[in-house]
Amino acid sequence: MSIINSPCPSCFKCSDMRVLNVKTPFCDELIIMCLLCEFCNYRSTEVKTGGQIQPKGRKITLKVTCDDDLKLDLFKSSTCMLKIPELEFEYENFLSEGSCISTVQGLVQNIKDTFEQKTAVFSDSDEKHVFLEFLAGLNEM
C-alpha cells in the first residue's frame, strides 16, 4: 500500500489517499484508492482496473442457495451486465456508479435503494406498479 498526499475535494486541505494494488481473478489487477479527510471527515473510494484489458469478457453465474452466498465479496466493473432471471431483471452499466467492491447482499441492496428512489418520479401508475413489483421481489430475495 502506498500513501499519496492529495487535496480533499471537500475542504481542499491536504489529506492522505491510500492506494492499494490487488491481483484478482478475471481482472488481473485492481487499484483501490481511499481518502478519508481528518479535517472534514470527507470519504471517497474509487476502484479502477489496472493492467491489460482481457481479450474476451467472462460470464460468471452465481446461484444463491444460502445466506452465506450473500456474504461473498465481488468486484463489479463499470461495464458489467447483471441478470436476475427470477425477477426478469437485466441491466447493463447499471446504477451508473462505475466500478465497486461489495458483497452480493450489498449489491442487491444498492439496486433496491436506487429503484426505490426512481419509483417516486413515475407519474404513470402502470410503470410505477412494475417497479413496485420488482422491489417486492427483491425484498423476498
Image (spheres, rainbow, N blue to C red):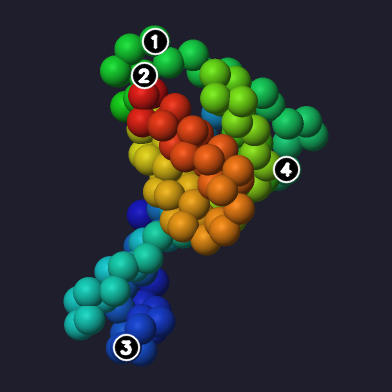
Q: Residues within 10 Å of mark 2 (few under 14, many from 20)?
A: some
| Cα distance in 3D space between marks 1 and 2 | 7 Å
The reply to whether the C-beta atoms of the residues labelled 2 and 3 are less than 8 Å apart is: no
Query: Which of the two labelled residues, at mark 2 and mark 3, occupies the earlier sequence position?
Result: 3
Read off the residue under disc 3.
11
The reply to whether the C-beta atoms of the residues labelled 4 and 2 are less than 8 Å apart is: no
| Cα distance in 3D space between marks 2 and 3 | 40 Å
Q: Residues within 10 Å of mark 3 (few under 14, many from 20)?
A: few
Q: Secondary structure at mark 1?
A: loop
Is residue 10 left or right of 124 when viewed as pictured? left
Query: Which of the two labelled residues, at mark 3 and mark 1, occupies the earlier sequence position?
Result: 3
Query: Which of the two labelled residues, at mark 1 and mark 4, occupies the earlier sequence position?
Result: 4
> What residue lies at 30% left-to-right and 78% top-to-bottom?
15
> What residue lies at 29% left-to-right and 74% top-to-bottom?
42
Is residue 94 left or right of 55 when viewed as pictured? left
Read off the residue under disc 2.
69
- Which numbered marker is on residue 121? none
Read off the residue under disc 4.
53
| Cα distance in 3D space between marks 4 and 3 | 36 Å
In the picture as drawn, the residue positioned furthest to the bottom comes out as 12
- Label 3 sits on what residue type? Cys
Front residue of 114 and 39? 114
- Label 2 sits on what residue type? Asp
**Percent position of residue 76, x then y:** 53, 41
| Cα distance in 3D space between marks 1 and 4 | 32 Å
Please state, as top left, top right, bottom left or bottom right, where the N terminus lies in the image: bottom left
- Label 4 sits on what residue type? Ile
Read off the residue under disc 1.
65
Quadrant housing residue 136: top left
**Percent position of residue 139, x then y:** 36, 31
The relative height of residue 5 versus residue 77 in the rendered view (above or below) is below
